[in-house]
Image (cartoon, rainbow, N blue to C red):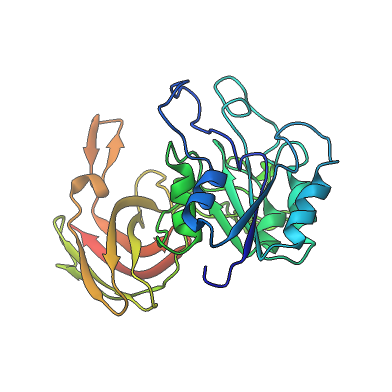
Amino acid sequence: RAELNRIAVIGPNADEELLGGYSTPKVRYFVSVLDGIRSHVGDEVEVLYAEGVSLEDFERENIAEAVAIAQKSDVAVIVIGGNEITCKENEDRDDLGLLGQQQALVEAVYATGTPVVVLLLHGRPLAIEWIEDHVPAILDGWYLGQETGNAVADVLLGEVNPGGKLPMTVPRNVGQAPIYYNIMPPGRPGRYFQSKAEPLWPFGHGLSYTSFEYSHLQITPTSSTSATINIDIINTGERTGDEVVQLYVRDEYASVVRPKMELKRFRRITLKPGEKRTVTFKPEKDAFAFYDEKTEEWIVEPGDFNIMIGSSSADIRLSQMLLMK
């Protein structure tokens, strides 16, 4: 922040009131991203604004204005996505790409060489593979409520360390849908002819301004329906931050087809730099059971259950078998 003299705030959602579908039409106040950034930097940093494009129209003549302010700024914050009109009940889409000329806007601003941050404010997952490949900083906000602008400014200016995790799997393109973290893999390697098989972002994914190390997974006892699971988490970075420790379970052998993994518990913790904490889980029967149609009861079958601890569904750091008798 100390090195910033000028910030370009760009995009159709930068100065909009976004609350999502079925939200109240009138609120006492709303802080847009533009207002939030201006309020936080005050007179110390000049904030320039250009809409660039609208959400749905295909006009491109105003992209030049966005490019111009980006060229003379230290950083460009591009706020794109959707709103309660483009994402609502009974309004499905057959394409998960950005509407209108938003993609062209991002590419034009990126081409200036000015460092770019893309902020997504939207109501459905967006397939933005080009942006993921080129833009080094992406903040996925969905709808953030009345304090949108202040929350965004806190994170972008380093006053708050983000610690959120994705509640769903985000596909690279609409052809990957449906896609979810515990889909049963096919009998042979599954891949696409001209696209990566992995999602754009996996379920549970989320970055931070710091880093965390997982160690010393202990399950006591290792053969019980009431085991205690301990994991040590240490903040190995230079910032205080939050980590969401996620516990996944896989039934290795079952009489029915089971998911390859299921999120059963999670714990959000805050750690100072260098601080270590032991996170404890005590999963009960529901973490291992499935509904048996014959007996019409939830049952736990004997056998091995793989206990997986990670930072996301695709970032499993530690695992160990638990035997159910």
Please tell me whether residue 122 is drawn above or below residue 139 in the rendered image: above
Taking 316 as reference, is 84 left or right?
Answer: right
Image position of 152 (left or right of 278): right
Residue 318 picture quarter = bottom left
Please state which of residues 215 and 320 is positioned toward the viewer in this rendering.
215
Q: Looking at the image, which residue is at 41% across and 62% down?
A: 159
Please give the name of the residue rendered at 82% of the width and 34% of the height, measured from the top-left corner.
Answer: 58
Asked where in the image residue 187 lies, by quadrant, the reply is: bottom right
Placement of the C terminus among the 4 image quadrants: bottom left
Looking at this view, is 63 or 295 the one in front?
63
Q: How many marks?
A: 0
**Residue 222 vertical placement versus 70 (above, below):** below
Residue 90 coordinates in the image, percent (x, y): 58, 19
Q: Is residue 103 left or right of residue 190?
A: right
Image location of residue 123, percent across then percent down: 54, 35
Residue 112 placement: quadrant: bottom right
The relative height of residue 242 versus residue 33 in the rendered view (above or below) is below
